Amino acid sequence: MKKYCSDLTVKAVDHINEKYILLRLTQDEPLPEMLPGQFVELKVEDSPATFLRRPISINNVDVQNNELHLLVALVGEGTRHLATLKSGDRLNLMYPLGNGFTLATASGSISKRLLIGGGVGVAPLLYLGKKLQEAGQEPTFLLGARSKKDLLMIDSFKQYGRVFVTTEDGTEGEKGFVTNHSLFNTEHFDLISCCGPMPMMKAVAQLADKLGTECEISLENKMACGLGACLCCVEKTKDKGNVCVCTEGPLFNSKRLNL
């Protein structure tokens, strides 16, 4: 898939809460094709402490309004600087990078899918759910957070499928971790797609193996270049040894990894 390095215009910065923003970007020309699970490398201008680009998952692509959406966690100077952007500002992006989630089985049919996300890891699952719905499937989302106030974009997810929730403190949905949800006692899924904190993804992969369910996870290793040149994101796999997550991934079948 062709990659681009171009300036996009900030259409809006939606402040979801004190920890997260949604960047809505656009350009005059139609946006290129992007796959759910791919990411961008974003250059943060006017931030002296931010030398490297920041990898951000593609949250959604709104073809009708020609918008690219990026859900950003405000965790450092670079990302906090993004929260100060205004409509009309410009951002330089390298995109779309990496591979994408599995959209169909080898036979071409769409499997029954469970999409599991935690924290800002829910970001790429929204676009995946949208594309699956467009392909004729109703995906199931299982979203986890520490508390009700930490849940993100629940109403948006409900547009594309069933939504189940866990919170560690029990303030919304079932109390506990996603791997403890009662959904696993009543339904079987052909494929689990997962993104979130590594401990959560490891637990999901182990549960999937126990259930005999295929599982793919989206790694969030540090990625300075996004092109496989800097070797910051190297991950050891069982089949190919060390690979760059930014080019070989970020999506991997969990059986390929040492989890």
Image: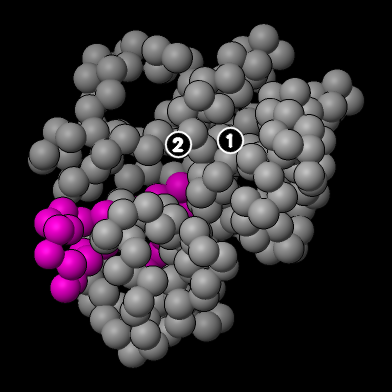
Indicate which disc residue 218 carries. 2
Residue density around tag 2, few if under 14, some if 14–19, many if 20 or more, within 10 Å: many
- Quarter occupied by residue 241: top left
Residue located beneath label 1 in the image:
193
Could you tell me which residue is drawn at 27 percent across and 39 percent down? Answer: 222
Quick one: 62 or 25, which is closer to the camera? 25
189 sits to left or right of 196:
right
- Quarter occupied by residue 230: top left
Could you tell me which residue is drawn at 45 percent across and 77 percent down? Answer: 13
Residue density around tag 1, few if under 14, some if 14–19, many if 20 or more, within 10 Å: many
Is residue 233 within the magenta segment? no
> Disc 2 or 1, which lies upstream in sequence?
1
Name the element at disc 2.
Answer: strand
User: Vertical placement of 245 versus 17: above or below?
Assistant: above
Place of residue 105 in the rendered image (x, y in percent of width and height, measured from the top left): 60, 34
Could you tell me which residue is drawn at 26 percent across and 54 percent down? Answer: 54
Q: Quadrant of the image for the N terminus? A: bottom left
Name the element at disc 1.
Answer: strand
Amino acid type, callout 1 = Ser
Place of residue 93 in the rendered image (x, y in percent of width and height, measured from the top left): 25, 66
Q: Marks 1 and 2: in contact by CB < 8 Å? A: yes
In this picture, which residue range is highlighted in magenta?
27-54
Q: Quadrant of the image for the C terminus? A: top left
Quick one: 207 or 137, which is closer to the camera? 207
Amino acid type, callout 2 = Ser
